[in-house]
Image (cartoon, helix red, strand yellow):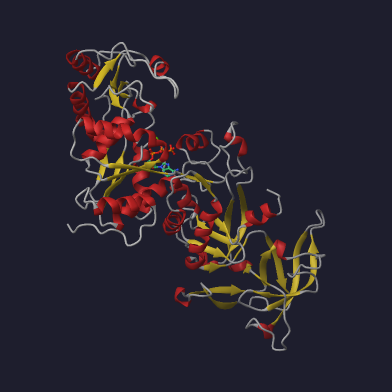
Protein backbone atom coordinates (compact mmCIF):
# COMPACT_ATOMS: atom_id res chain seq x y z
CA UNK A 1 0.00 0.00 0.00
CA UNK A 2 1.30 3.45 -0.84
CA UNK A 3 1.70 5.77 2.11
CA UNK A 4 -1.11 8.24 2.41
CA UNK A 5 -0.46 11.82 1.37
CA UNK A 6 -1.05 14.83 3.54
CA UNK A 7 -3.83 16.96 2.12
CA UNK A 8 -2.61 19.97 0.11
CA UNK A 9 -4.76 22.33 2.11
CA UNK A 10 -6.63 20.87 5.07
CA UNK A 11 -10.17 22.17 5.11
CA UNK A 12 -10.96 21.54 8.76
CA UNK A 13 -9.39 20.76 12.12
CA UNK A 14 -9.85 17.01 11.70
CA UNK A 15 -7.90 16.89 8.46
CA UNK A 16 -5.31 19.18 10.01
CA UNK A 17 -4.86 16.69 12.84
CA UNK A 18 -4.64 13.76 10.43
CA UNK A 19 -1.99 15.63 8.44
CA UNK A 20 -0.04 16.09 11.68
CA UNK A 21 -0.24 12.35 12.39
CA UNK A 22 0.93 11.55 8.87
CA UNK A 23 3.89 13.88 9.19
CA UNK A 24 4.81 12.35 12.53
CA UNK A 25 4.21 8.85 11.15
CA UNK A 26 1.94 8.10 14.10
CA UNK A 27 -0.05 5.37 12.37
CA UNK A 28 2.59 4.28 9.82
CA UNK A 29 0.93 6.41 7.20
CA UNK A 30 -2.44 4.69 7.60
CA UNK A 31 -5.82 6.38 7.78
CA UNK A 32 -8.65 4.08 8.89
CA UNK A 33 -12.01 5.45 9.99
CA UNK A 34 -15.38 3.85 10.73
CA UNK A 35 -19.01 4.82 10.81
CA UNK A 36 -20.49 3.13 13.89
CA UNK A 37 -24.29 3.52 14.12
CA UNK A 38 -26.29 1.70 16.74
CA UNK A 39 -29.10 -0.20 14.98
CA UNK A 40 -31.82 1.25 17.19
CA UNK A 41 -33.41 3.53 14.62
CA UNK A 42 -33.09 4.76 11.05
CA UNK A 43 -30.25 7.05 10.03
CA UNK A 44 -30.97 10.76 9.79
CA UNK A 45 -29.28 13.72 8.13
CA UNK A 46 -27.02 14.12 11.18
CA UNK A 47 -25.73 10.62 10.56
CA UNK A 48 -25.24 11.54 6.90
CA UNK A 49 -22.84 14.23 8.05
CA UNK A 50 -20.85 11.63 9.96
CA UNK A 51 -21.01 9.15 7.04
CA UNK A 52 -19.74 11.77 4.59
CA UNK A 53 -17.01 12.80 7.00
CA UNK A 54 -15.73 9.30 7.74
CA UNK A 55 -15.98 7.90 4.23
CA UNK A 56 -14.84 11.22 2.74
CA UNK A 57 -11.68 11.27 4.84
CA UNK A 58 -10.92 7.65 3.98
CA UNK A 59 -11.28 8.40 0.26
CA UNK A 60 -9.23 11.57 0.41
CA UNK A 61 -6.32 9.91 2.22
CA UNK A 62 -6.62 6.64 0.30
CA UNK A 63 -7.48 4.89 3.52
CA UNK A 64 -10.40 2.74 4.55
CA UNK A 65 -13.72 3.30 6.29
CA UNK A 66 -15.55 0.45 8.01
CA UNK A 67 -19.26 0.20 8.53
CA UNK A 68 -19.75 -1.11 12.05
CA UNK A 69 -23.10 -1.86 13.63
CA UNK A 70 -22.52 -0.83 17.22
CA UNK A 71 -24.96 -3.34 18.62
CA UNK A 72 -23.92 -3.88 22.21
CA UNK A 73 -27.17 -2.85 23.87
CA UNK A 74 -29.94 -5.30 22.96
CA UNK A 75 -32.85 -3.03 23.89
CA UNK A 76 -34.31 -1.40 20.82
CA UNK A 77 -31.89 -2.93 18.34
CA UNK A 78 -33.22 -4.92 15.41
CA UNK A 79 -32.49 -6.44 12.05
CA UNK A 80 -34.89 -4.02 10.37
CA UNK A 81 -32.69 -1.15 11.54
CA UNK A 82 -29.52 -2.94 10.43
CA UNK A 83 -30.95 -3.43 6.96
CA UNK A 84 -32.09 0.17 6.72
CA UNK A 85 -28.64 1.42 7.77
CA UNK A 86 -26.86 -0.74 5.19
CA UNK A 87 -29.28 0.41 2.52
CA UNK A 88 -29.02 4.07 3.40
CA UNK A 89 -25.22 4.26 3.56
CA UNK A 90 -24.99 2.48 0.21
CA UNK A 91 -27.64 4.77 -1.28
CA UNK A 92 -25.66 7.80 -0.08
CA UNK A 93 -22.92 6.51 -2.37
CA UNK A 94 -20.41 4.92 -0.04
CA UNK A 95 -18.71 1.54 -0.17
CA UNK A 96 -17.22 -0.35 2.78
CA UNK A 97 -16.14 -3.25 0.53
CA UNK A 98 -15.79 -6.32 2.76
CA UNK A 99 -15.56 -4.31 5.96
CA UNK A 100 -19.02 -4.67 7.44
CA UNK A 101 -18.60 -5.41 11.15
CA UNK A 102 -20.81 -5.99 14.16
CA UNK A 103 -19.65 -5.05 17.64
CA UNK A 104 -21.68 -8.04 18.87
CA UNK A 105 -19.16 -10.28 17.07
CA UNK A 106 -16.61 -9.01 19.59
CA UNK A 107 -18.60 -10.00 22.71
CA UNK A 108 -16.22 -12.85 23.59
CA UNK A 109 -13.13 -10.72 22.95
CA UNK A 110 -14.59 -7.88 25.00
CA UNK A 111 -15.30 -10.27 27.85
CA UNK A 112 -11.69 -11.46 27.76
CA UNK A 113 -10.44 -7.86 27.79
CA UNK A 114 -12.54 -7.27 30.91
CA UNK A 115 -11.01 -10.36 32.54
CA UNK A 116 -7.59 -8.97 31.68
CA UNK A 117 -8.44 -5.64 33.34
CA UNK A 118 -9.54 -7.46 36.49
CA UNK A 119 -6.28 -9.39 36.45
CA UNK A 120 -4.23 -6.19 36.49
CA UNK A 121 -6.47 -4.90 39.30
CA UNK A 122 -8.04 -2.21 37.13
CA UNK A 123 -11.63 -3.41 37.37
CA UNK A 124 -13.82 -4.76 40.14
CA UNK A 125 -17.25 -6.23 40.64
CA UNK A 126 -19.47 -3.83 42.58
CA UNK A 127 -22.74 -4.67 44.30
CA UNK A 128 -24.06 -1.12 44.62
CA UNK A 129 -27.20 -0.54 42.61
CA UNK A 130 -27.55 2.10 39.91
CA UNK A 131 -28.99 4.73 42.29
CA UNK A 132 -26.28 4.18 44.88
CA UNK A 133 -23.58 4.45 42.26
CA UNK A 134 -25.07 7.68 41.02
CA UNK A 135 -25.34 9.10 44.53
CA UNK A 136 -21.78 8.21 45.39
CA UNK A 137 -20.34 9.60 42.19
CA UNK A 138 -20.05 13.13 43.63
CA UNK A 139 -20.52 16.35 41.69
CA UNK A 140 -18.41 18.81 39.77
CA UNK A 141 -17.40 20.40 43.09
CA UNK A 142 -17.34 17.32 45.32
CA UNK A 143 -15.33 14.15 44.90
CA UNK A 144 -17.09 10.78 44.77
CA UNK A 145 -16.96 8.09 47.43
CA UNK A 146 -15.21 4.82 46.97
CA UNK A 147 -17.38 1.72 46.74
CA UNK A 148 -17.09 -0.69 49.68
CA UNK A 149 -16.35 -3.37 47.04
CA UNK A 150 -13.49 -1.45 45.48
CA UNK A 151 -10.82 -3.49 47.21
CA UNK A 152 -12.16 -6.94 46.53
CA UNK A 153 -9.40 -9.38 45.69
CA UNK A 154 -8.61 -10.14 42.08
CA UNK A 155 -9.64 -13.77 42.62
CA UNK A 156 -12.99 -12.79 44.05
CA UNK A 157 -13.59 -10.34 41.17
CA UNK A 158 -12.73 -13.01 38.61
CA UNK A 159 -15.05 -15.46 40.29
CA UNK A 160 -17.95 -13.00 40.51
CA UNK A 161 -17.50 -11.72 36.97
CA UNK A 162 -17.51 -15.26 35.58
CA UNK A 163 -20.65 -15.99 37.57
CA UNK A 164 -22.23 -12.76 36.26
CA UNK A 165 -21.68 -14.14 32.79
CA UNK A 166 -23.06 -17.57 33.58
CA UNK A 167 -26.34 -16.10 34.77
CA UNK A 168 -26.10 -16.79 38.47
CA UNK A 169 -27.30 -13.31 39.50
CA UNK A 170 -30.37 -11.18 38.99
CA UNK A 171 -30.29 -8.21 36.68
CA UNK A 172 -28.68 -5.29 38.48
CA UNK A 173 -27.23 -7.39 41.32
CA UNK A 174 -23.67 -6.59 40.26
CA UNK A 175 -21.79 -4.45 37.77
CA UNK A 176 -18.18 -4.47 36.67
CA UNK A 177 -16.53 -1.10 37.22
CA UNK A 178 -13.22 0.35 36.14
CA UNK A 179 -10.90 1.13 39.05
CA UNK A 180 -9.71 4.62 38.21
CA UNK A 181 -10.15 7.55 40.58
CA UNK A 182 -13.23 8.59 42.54
CA UNK A 183 -11.71 12.05 43.03
CA UNK A 184 -11.03 12.74 39.36
CA UNK A 185 -12.21 16.19 38.26
CA UNK A 186 -13.67 14.39 35.22
CA UNK A 187 -16.74 12.58 36.54
CA UNK A 188 -16.56 10.09 33.67
CA UNK A 189 -13.36 8.77 35.26
CA UNK A 190 -14.92 8.04 38.66
CA UNK A 191 -14.97 4.26 38.39
CA UNK A 192 -17.35 4.05 35.42
CA UNK A 193 -19.45 0.94 34.82
CA UNK A 194 -18.01 -1.39 32.18
CA UNK A 195 -20.49 -4.29 32.23
CA UNK A 196 -23.99 -4.83 33.51
CA UNK A 197 -26.28 -7.81 33.91
CA UNK A 198 -29.25 -7.50 31.59
CA UNK A 199 -31.48 -10.32 30.50
CA UNK A 200 -32.66 -9.38 27.05
CA UNK A 201 -32.83 -11.08 23.71
CA UNK A 202 -30.19 -9.68 21.41
CA UNK A 203 -31.29 -9.68 17.77
CA UNK A 204 -28.07 -11.49 16.78
CA UNK A 205 -26.77 -13.34 19.81
CA UNK A 206 -30.15 -14.23 21.25
CA UNK A 207 -29.87 -15.29 24.90
CA UNK A 208 -26.23 -16.30 24.64
CA UNK A 209 -25.26 -13.37 26.86
CA UNK A 210 -26.84 -11.94 29.97
CA UNK A 211 -24.12 -9.38 30.55
CA UNK A 212 -23.52 -6.57 28.11
CA UNK A 213 -20.61 -4.11 27.86
CA UNK A 214 -21.21 -0.38 28.21
CA UNK A 215 -20.59 1.93 25.26
CA UNK A 216 -17.37 3.35 26.74
CA UNK A 217 -15.87 -0.09 27.11
CA UNK A 218 -17.08 -1.60 23.84
CA UNK A 219 -16.39 1.35 21.59
CA UNK A 220 -12.69 1.95 22.12
CA UNK A 221 -11.98 -1.78 22.03
CA UNK A 222 -14.00 -2.31 18.86
CA UNK A 223 -12.03 0.53 17.28
CA UNK A 224 -8.79 -1.03 18.44
CA UNK A 225 -9.74 -4.51 17.21
CA UNK A 226 -10.46 -3.03 13.77
CA UNK A 227 -7.18 -1.07 13.84
CA UNK A 228 -8.99 2.21 13.36
CA UNK A 229 -6.61 5.18 13.36
CA UNK A 230 -9.09 8.04 13.74
CA UNK A 231 -12.23 7.49 15.77
CA UNK A 232 -14.40 10.44 14.89
CA UNK A 233 -17.41 11.08 17.12
CA UNK A 234 -19.63 13.92 18.27
CA UNK A 235 -18.81 16.51 20.90
CA UNK A 236 -20.73 14.96 23.78
CA UNK A 237 -18.01 12.29 23.97
CA UNK A 238 -15.25 14.78 24.67
CA UNK A 239 -15.29 14.00 28.41
CA UNK A 240 -15.15 10.30 27.58
CA UNK A 241 -11.90 10.56 25.65
CA UNK A 242 -9.70 10.10 28.76
CA UNK A 243 -11.65 6.91 29.50
CA UNK A 244 -11.26 5.75 25.89
CA UNK A 245 -7.51 6.20 26.25
CA UNK A 246 -7.34 4.76 29.77
CA UNK A 247 -8.92 1.45 28.79
CA UNK A 248 -6.62 0.97 25.81
CA UNK A 249 -3.58 1.97 27.89
CA UNK A 250 -4.34 -0.45 30.74
CA UNK A 251 -4.64 -3.27 28.25
CA UNK A 252 -1.42 -2.14 26.56
CA UNK A 253 -2.93 -2.53 23.12
CA UNK A 254 -0.76 -1.70 20.12
CA UNK A 255 -3.67 -0.39 18.14
CA UNK A 256 -4.63 2.83 19.90
CA UNK A 257 -6.87 5.05 17.78
CA UNK A 258 -7.14 8.80 18.23
CA UNK A 259 -10.62 9.90 19.23
CA UNK A 260 -11.60 13.21 17.64
CA UNK A 261 -14.83 15.03 18.45
CA UNK A 262 -16.79 17.36 16.18
CA UNK A 263 -20.06 19.26 16.58
CA UNK A 264 -23.19 17.29 15.75
CA UNK A 265 -25.49 18.62 13.11
CA UNK A 266 -28.63 20.37 14.33
CA UNK A 267 -31.06 21.40 11.65
CA UNK A 268 -33.83 23.97 11.95
CA UNK A 269 -37.52 23.03 11.70
CA UNK A 270 -36.85 19.38 12.50
CA UNK A 271 -35.56 17.07 15.22
CA UNK A 272 -32.44 14.95 14.93
CA UNK A 273 -32.47 12.39 17.66
CA UNK A 274 -33.54 8.82 17.26
CA UNK A 275 -35.50 8.94 20.48
CA UNK A 276 -37.66 11.79 19.19
CA UNK A 277 -37.95 10.34 15.70
CA UNK A 278 -39.15 7.05 17.17
CA UNK A 279 -41.77 9.01 19.08
CA UNK A 280 -43.04 10.60 15.87
CA UNK A 281 -43.33 7.16 14.29
CA UNK A 282 -44.93 5.41 17.27
CA UNK A 283 -47.41 8.19 17.98
CA UNK A 284 -48.23 8.20 14.24
CA UNK A 285 -47.53 11.86 13.64
CA UNK A 286 -45.89 10.59 10.46
CA UNK A 287 -46.60 7.54 8.30
CA UNK A 288 -43.32 5.82 9.19
CA UNK A 289 -39.55 6.21 9.23
CA UNK A 290 -39.61 6.94 5.51
CA UNK A 291 -42.38 9.53 5.66
CA UNK A 292 -41.18 12.22 3.22
CA UNK A 293 -41.29 14.82 6.01
CA UNK A 294 -38.86 12.90 8.19
CA UNK A 295 -35.21 14.02 8.32
CA UNK A 296 -34.21 10.38 7.94
CA UNK A 297 -32.19 9.26 4.92
CA UNK A 298 -35.10 7.00 3.99
CA UNK A 299 -37.54 9.91 4.32
CA UNK A 300 -35.39 12.28 2.30
CA UNK A 301 -34.96 9.61 -0.34
CA UNK A 302 -38.69 9.12 -0.60
CA UNK A 303 -39.16 12.88 -0.64
CA UNK A 304 -36.95 12.97 -3.73
CA UNK A 305 -33.69 14.38 -2.36
CA UNK A 306 -30.73 12.94 -4.23
CA UNK A 307 -27.60 11.51 -2.61
CA UNK A 308 -25.55 14.17 -4.46
CA UNK A 309 -27.58 16.95 -2.90
CA UNK A 310 -27.20 15.49 0.58
CA UNK A 311 -23.45 14.94 0.15
CA UNK A 312 -23.11 18.44 -1.18
CA UNK A 313 -24.95 19.84 1.83
CA UNK A 314 -22.69 17.90 4.21
CA UNK A 315 -19.64 19.24 2.46
CA UNK A 316 -20.89 22.81 2.58
CA UNK A 317 -21.66 22.81 6.30
CA UNK A 318 -18.19 21.43 7.03
CA UNK A 319 -17.09 20.33 10.48
CA UNK A 320 -16.60 22.51 13.50
CA UNK A 321 -15.95 22.28 17.21
CA UNK A 322 -18.98 24.31 18.33
CA UNK A 323 -22.59 23.27 18.23
CA UNK A 324 -24.79 25.30 15.96
CA UNK A 325 -28.20 25.18 14.33
CA UNK A 326 -27.96 24.93 10.55
CA UNK A 327 -30.78 26.52 8.58
CA UNK A 328 -32.76 23.85 6.74
CA UNK A 329 -33.00 26.37 3.88
CA UNK A 330 -29.39 25.50 3.10
CA UNK A 331 -30.31 21.84 2.65
CA UNK A 332 -33.27 22.86 0.49
CA UNK A 333 -30.97 25.11 -1.51
CA UNK A 334 -28.64 22.17 -2.23
CA UNK A 335 -31.61 20.02 -3.23
CA UNK A 336 -32.96 22.73 -5.52
CA UNK A 337 -29.59 23.38 -7.10
CA UNK A 338 -29.18 19.70 -7.92
CA UNK A 339 -32.71 19.40 -9.31
CA UNK A 340 -32.42 22.55 -11.36
CA UNK A 341 -29.65 20.85 -13.25
CA UNK A 342 -31.02 17.30 -13.37
CA UNK A 343 -34.80 17.35 -13.36
CA UNK A 344 -36.68 17.14 -16.66
CA UNK A 345 -39.32 19.84 -17.09
CA UNK A 346 -42.92 18.77 -17.54
CA UNK A 347 -46.34 20.36 -17.12
CA UNK A 348 -48.84 19.52 -14.42
CA UNK A 349 -51.94 21.30 -13.21
CA UNK A 350 -52.57 20.92 -9.49
CA UNK A 351 -55.81 22.92 -9.13
CA UNK A 352 -57.48 22.42 -12.50
CA UNK A 353 -59.76 24.92 -14.21
CA UNK A 354 -61.25 23.82 -17.54
CA UNK A 355 -60.72 25.92 -20.63
CA UNK A 356 -62.49 25.52 -23.96
CA UNK A 357 -60.80 27.16 -26.92
CA UNK A 358 -63.86 28.01 -28.98
CA UNK A 359 -62.07 28.65 -32.28
CA UNK A 360 -59.88 25.54 -32.13
CA UNK A 361 -61.36 22.78 -34.32
CA UNK A 362 -63.03 20.00 -32.43
CA UNK A 363 -61.11 16.73 -32.67
CA UNK A 364 -57.92 18.42 -33.83
CA UNK A 365 -54.74 17.50 -31.99
CA UNK A 366 -51.29 19.02 -32.28
CA UNK A 367 -48.04 17.69 -30.92
CA UNK A 368 -45.56 20.19 -29.57
CA UNK A 369 -42.06 18.89 -29.41
CA UNK A 370 -40.91 20.33 -26.11
CA UNK A 371 -37.40 20.15 -24.63
CA UNK A 372 -36.96 18.52 -21.24
CA UNK A 373 -34.51 21.17 -20.13
CA UNK A 374 -34.16 24.76 -21.32
CA UNK A 375 -30.38 24.80 -20.92
CA UNK A 376 -29.53 21.21 -21.68
CA UNK A 377 -30.63 19.97 -25.12
CA UNK A 378 -28.84 16.70 -24.33
CA UNK A 379 -31.78 15.77 -22.10
CA UNK A 380 -33.93 15.46 -25.21
CA UNK A 381 -37.57 16.33 -25.61
CA UNK A 382 -41.04 14.90 -25.33
CA UNK A 383 -44.31 15.39 -27.17
CA UNK A 384 -46.91 17.57 -25.53
CA UNK A 385 -50.42 17.27 -26.92
CA UNK A 386 -52.54 20.33 -27.57
CA UNK A 387 -56.28 20.30 -28.17
CA UNK A 388 -59.46 22.33 -27.82
CA UNK A 389 -59.99 21.44 -24.14
CA UNK A 390 -57.35 22.30 -21.62
CA UNK A 391 -56.80 22.49 -17.90
CA UNK A 392 -55.01 25.49 -16.51
CA UNK A 393 -54.11 26.34 -12.93
CA UNK A 394 -57.07 27.88 -11.12
CA UNK A 395 -54.99 30.69 -9.66
CA UNK A 396 -53.67 31.68 -13.08
CA UNK A 397 -57.10 33.21 -13.65
CA UNK A 398 -58.90 36.03 -11.88
CA UNK A 399 -62.29 37.33 -12.84
CA UNK A 400 -61.69 40.77 -11.41
CA UNK A 401 -57.94 41.04 -11.20
CA UNK A 402 -56.07 43.65 -9.20
CA UNK A 403 -53.74 45.95 -11.12
CA UNK A 404 -50.62 43.87 -10.91
CA UNK A 405 -52.19 40.54 -11.89
CA UNK A 406 -50.50 39.70 -15.19
CA UNK A 407 -52.09 36.36 -15.93
CA UNK A 408 -55.44 35.40 -17.42
CA UNK A 409 -58.57 37.51 -16.89
CA UNK A 410 -61.63 38.30 -19.02
CA UNK A 411 -60.39 40.09 -22.15
CA UNK A 412 -56.73 39.38 -21.33
CA UNK A 413 -54.29 37.45 -23.45
CA UNK A 414 -51.50 35.14 -22.22
CA UNK A 415 -49.07 32.74 -23.84
CA UNK A 416 -49.58 29.03 -23.34
CA UNK A 417 -46.24 27.42 -22.57
CA UNK A 418 -44.72 25.92 -25.76
CA UNK A 419 -47.61 27.22 -27.81
CA UNK A 420 -50.14 29.78 -28.79
CA UNK A 421 -51.44 33.05 -27.42
CA UNK A 422 -54.84 32.60 -25.84
CA UNK A 423 -57.43 35.17 -24.83
CA UNK A 424 -60.24 34.79 -22.31
CA UNK A 425 -63.66 35.60 -23.74
CA UNK A 426 -66.17 34.48 -21.14
CA UNK A 427 -66.61 32.75 -17.82
CA UNK A 428 -69.02 29.95 -16.93
CA UNK A 429 -69.96 29.68 -13.28
CA UNK A 430 -71.41 26.95 -11.18
CA UNK A 431 -74.94 28.23 -10.53
CA UNK A 432 -75.00 26.73 -7.03
CA UNK A 433 -71.69 27.88 -5.70
CA UNK A 434 -70.94 30.84 -7.91
CA UNK A 435 -67.47 29.42 -8.40
CA UNK A 436 -65.79 29.75 -11.81
CA UNK A 437 -66.38 26.39 -13.53
CA UNK A 438 -65.00 26.89 -17.02
CA UNK A 439 -63.45 29.52 -19.26
CA UNK A 440 -64.14 30.12 -22.89
CA UNK A 441 -61.15 31.39 -24.81
CA UNK A 442 -59.88 31.91 -28.30
CA UNK A 443 -56.41 31.27 -29.61
CA UNK A 444 -54.43 33.05 -32.30
CA UNK A 445 -53.30 30.48 -34.92
CA UNK A 446 -50.52 32.87 -36.03
CA UNK A 447 -48.73 32.57 -32.66
CA UNK A 448 -47.69 28.90 -32.78
CA UNK A 449 -44.03 29.95 -32.37
CA UNK A 450 -44.90 31.70 -29.13
CA UNK A 451 -44.63 35.11 -30.76
CA UNK A 452 -47.16 37.25 -32.62
CA UNK A 453 -46.31 38.34 -36.18
CA UNK A 454 -47.73 41.78 -35.41
CA UNK A 455 -45.30 42.15 -32.56
CA UNK A 456 -47.88 42.37 -29.80
CA UNK A 457 -46.74 41.19 -26.39
CA UNK A 458 -48.34 39.27 -23.52
CA UNK A 459 -47.55 39.73 -19.85
CA UNK A 460 -47.43 36.09 -18.83
CA UNK A 461 -46.87 32.52 -19.94
CA UNK A 462 -48.94 29.92 -18.17
CA UNK A 463 -48.76 26.12 -18.09
CA UNK A 464 -51.57 23.78 -19.08
CA UNK A 465 -52.41 20.21 -20.03
CA UNK A 466 -54.79 18.86 -22.63
CA UNK A 467 -57.90 17.38 -21.03
CA UNK A 468 -58.00 14.32 -23.26
CA UNK A 469 -54.29 13.67 -23.10
CA UNK A 470 -53.51 14.26 -19.48
CA UNK A 471 -53.23 11.69 -16.72
CA UNK A 472 -54.89 12.16 -13.40
CA UNK A 473 -52.60 12.14 -10.41
CA UNK A 474 -52.44 12.60 -6.69
CA UNK A 475 -49.97 15.21 -5.52
CA UNK A 476 -48.70 15.45 -1.97
CA UNK A 477 -47.48 18.86 -0.97
CA UNK A 478 -44.97 18.48 1.82
CA UNK A 479 -43.79 21.28 3.98
CA UNK A 480 -41.58 21.55 7.04
CA UNK A 481 -42.49 19.18 9.83
CA UNK A 482 -42.31 21.81 12.58
CA UNK A 483 -43.53 25.38 12.72
CA UNK A 484 -40.67 26.75 14.73
CA UNK A 485 -36.97 26.65 14.00
CA UNK A 486 -35.93 24.92 17.22
CA UNK A 487 -38.75 22.61 18.34
CA UNK A 488 -36.66 20.97 21.06
CA UNK A 489 -35.24 24.19 22.41
CA UNK A 490 -38.11 24.64 24.82
CA UNK A 491 -38.86 22.45 27.80
CA UNK A 492 -42.36 21.53 26.65
CA UNK A 493 -43.44 18.64 24.46
CA UNK A 494 -41.78 19.10 21.07
CA UNK A 495 -44.76 17.54 19.28
CA UNK A 496 -46.75 20.67 20.16
CA UNK A 497 -44.74 22.48 17.53
CA UNK A 498 -45.59 20.14 14.66
CA UNK A 499 -46.71 22.02 11.56
CA UNK A 500 -50.37 21.06 10.98
CA UNK A 501 -49.93 21.96 7.32
CA UNK A 502 -46.89 19.80 6.72
CA UNK A 503 -48.88 17.63 4.32
CA UNK A 504 -51.59 18.68 1.90
CA UNK A 505 -52.90 16.00 -0.40
CA UNK A 506 -54.38 17.02 -3.74
CA UNK A 507 -56.31 14.24 -5.41
CA UNK A 508 -57.59 15.80 -8.62
CA UNK A 509 -54.44 16.91 -10.40
CA UNK A 510 -53.54 16.34 -14.02
CA UNK A 511 -50.12 15.76 -15.50
CA UNK A 512 -49.00 15.66 -19.11
CA UNK A 513 -49.11 12.32 -20.91
CA UNK A 514 -45.34 11.93 -21.13
CA UNK A 515 -45.43 10.95 -17.46
CA UNK A 516 -47.18 7.72 -18.32
CA UNK A 517 -44.96 4.98 -16.92
CA UNK A 518 -42.79 7.43 -14.97
CA UNK A 519 -40.40 5.36 -12.88
CA UNK A 520 -40.63 5.35 -9.08
CA UNK A 521 -38.32 7.98 -7.58
CA UNK A 522 -38.18 9.81 -10.92
CA UNK A 523 -37.68 13.54 -10.41
CA UNK A 524 -39.38 16.28 -12.40
CA UNK A 525 -39.84 19.97 -12.39
CA UNK A 526 -43.52 20.76 -12.78
CA UNK A 527 -43.05 24.02 -14.61
CA UNK A 528 -43.79 27.09 -12.53
CA UNK A 529 -44.75 24.97 -9.50
CA UNK A 530 -41.84 23.10 -8.03
CA UNK A 531 -39.89 19.87 -8.04
CA UNK A 532 -41.73 16.59 -7.65
CA UNK A 533 -40.91 12.91 -7.60
CA UNK A 534 -42.86 9.75 -8.20
CA UNK A 535 -43.64 8.26 -4.79
CA UNK A 536 -41.75 4.99 -4.48
CA UNK A 537 -44.40 3.29 -2.35
CA UNK A 538 -47.83 4.47 -3.38
CA UNK A 539 -47.52 5.38 -7.04
CA UNK A 540 -48.53 2.86 -9.71
CA UNK A 541 -49.01 3.13 -13.47
CA UNK A 542 -52.76 3.24 -12.89
CA UNK A 543 -52.58 5.81 -10.10
CA UNK A 544 -49.70 8.23 -10.23
CA UNK A 545 -48.67 9.77 -6.91
CA UNK A 546 -46.16 12.59 -6.76
CA UNK A 547 -44.37 14.10 -3.78
CA UNK A 548 -43.32 17.70 -3.72
CA UNK A 549 -39.59 17.62 -3.16
CA UNK A 550 -39.14 21.35 -2.81
CA UNK A 551 -40.74 24.50 -4.16
CA UNK A 552 -39.00 26.48 -6.91
CA UNK A 553 -38.09 29.24 -4.49
CA UNK A 554 -37.68 29.48 -0.77
CA UNK A 555 -41.16 30.63 0.21
CA UNK A 556 -40.30 30.48 3.93
CA UNK A 557 -37.62 33.14 3.53
CA UNK A 558 -40.20 35.44 1.94
CA UNK A 559 -42.75 34.71 4.63
CA UNK A 560 -40.39 35.26 7.51
CA UNK A 561 -39.25 38.53 5.96
CA UNK A 562 -42.84 39.62 6.19
CA UNK A 563 -42.86 38.37 9.76
CA UNK A 564 -45.73 35.99 9.14
CA UNK A 565 -43.98 32.82 10.33
P1 LIG B 1 -29.12 10.07 18.12
O1 LIG B 1 -28.66 11.15 19.05
O2 LIG B 1 -29.83 10.57 16.92
O3 LIG B 1 -29.86 8.99 18.81
P2 LIG B 1 -26.69 8.65 18.21
O4 LIG B 1 -25.47 9.49 18.31
O5 LIG B 1 -27.13 7.95 19.42
O6 LIG B 1 -27.81 9.48 17.52
P3 LIG B 1 -25.46 6.53 16.78
O7 LIG B 1 -26.11 5.43 16.04
O8 LIG B 1 -24.70 6.21 18.00
O9 LIG B 1 -26.57 7.60 17.08
O10 LIG B 1 -24.56 7.40 15.79
C1 LIG B 1 -23.65 6.87 14.85
C2 LIG B 1 -22.66 7.94 14.51
O11 LIG B 1 -23.31 9.07 13.95
C3 LIG B 1 -21.91 8.40 15.73
O12 LIG B 1 -20.54 8.48 15.42
C4 LIG B 1 -22.51 9.74 16.03
O13 LIG B 1 -21.57 10.57 16.64
C5 LIG B 1 -22.92 10.23 14.65
N1 LIG B 1 -24.05 11.17 14.74
C6 LIG B 1 -25.24 10.95 15.33
N2 LIG B 1 -26.02 12.05 15.27
C7 LIG B 1 -25.29 12.99 14.63
C8 LIG B 1 -25.52 14.36 14.26
N3 LIG B 1 -26.68 14.97 14.56
N4 LIG B 1 -24.54 15.01 13.61
C9 LIG B 1 -23.40 14.40 13.31
N5 LIG B 1 -23.11 13.14 13.62
C10 LIG B 1 -24.03 12.43 14.28
MG1 LIG C 1 -25.60 6.51 20.35
Residue 267 higher or lower than 441, as above or below: above
Look at the image and tell me in which quarter the N terminus lies. Answer: bottom left
Q: Position of residue 375 (x, y in %)?
A: 51, 75
Report the residue at 21% width, 51% height from top. Answer: 25
Q: Would you say 561 lies left or right of 513 here?
A: right
Q: Mark yes or no: residue 546 visible.
A: no
Q: Give the quadrant of residue 425.
A: bottom right
Q: Mark yes or no: residue 191 visible.
A: yes
Q: Nearer the viewer, residue 8 or 213?
A: 8
Residue 537 higher or lower than 489, as above or below: below
Q: Nearer the viewer, residue 134 or 397?
A: 134
Q: Position of residue 199 (x, y in %)?
A: 32, 20
Taking the image in four quarters, ligand 1 sits in the one at top left
Q: Give the quadrant of residue 208.
A: top left
Q: Would you say 12 lies left or right of 266 here?
A: left
Q: Nearer the viewer, residue 459 or 547?
A: 459
Q: Position of residue 450 (x, y in %)?
A: 64, 81
Report the residue at 39% width, 26% height from top. Answer: 187
Q: Would you say 531 lies left or right of 179 here?
A: right
Residue 440 higher or lower than 350, as above or below: below
Report the residue at 25% width, 18% height from top. Answer: 124
Q: Would you say 205 lies left or right of 343 here?
A: left
Among all residues in the image, which is located at the extreme bottom? 454
Q: Position of residue 495 (x, y in %)?
A: 58, 35
Q: Nearer the viewer, residue 425 or 560?
A: 560
Number of on-image labels: 0
Report the residue at 34% width, 53% height from top. Answer: 15
Amino acid sequence: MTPTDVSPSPTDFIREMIDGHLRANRFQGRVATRFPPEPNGYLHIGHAKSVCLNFGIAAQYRGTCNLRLDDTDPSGESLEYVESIINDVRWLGFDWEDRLFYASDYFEQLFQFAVQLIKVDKAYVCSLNADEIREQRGTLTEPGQESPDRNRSIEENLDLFTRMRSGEFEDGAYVLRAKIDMTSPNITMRDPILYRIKRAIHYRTGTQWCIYPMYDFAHCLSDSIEKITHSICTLEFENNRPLYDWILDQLELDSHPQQIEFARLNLSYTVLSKRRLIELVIREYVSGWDDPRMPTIAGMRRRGYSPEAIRNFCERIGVAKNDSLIDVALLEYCVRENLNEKAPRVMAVLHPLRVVIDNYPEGQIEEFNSPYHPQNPGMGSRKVFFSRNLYIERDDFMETPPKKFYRLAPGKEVRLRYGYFMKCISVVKNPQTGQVAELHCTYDPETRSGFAPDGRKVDATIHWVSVDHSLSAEVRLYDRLFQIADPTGKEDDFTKHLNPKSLETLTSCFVESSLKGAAPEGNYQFERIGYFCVDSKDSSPGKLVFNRIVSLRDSWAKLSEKGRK
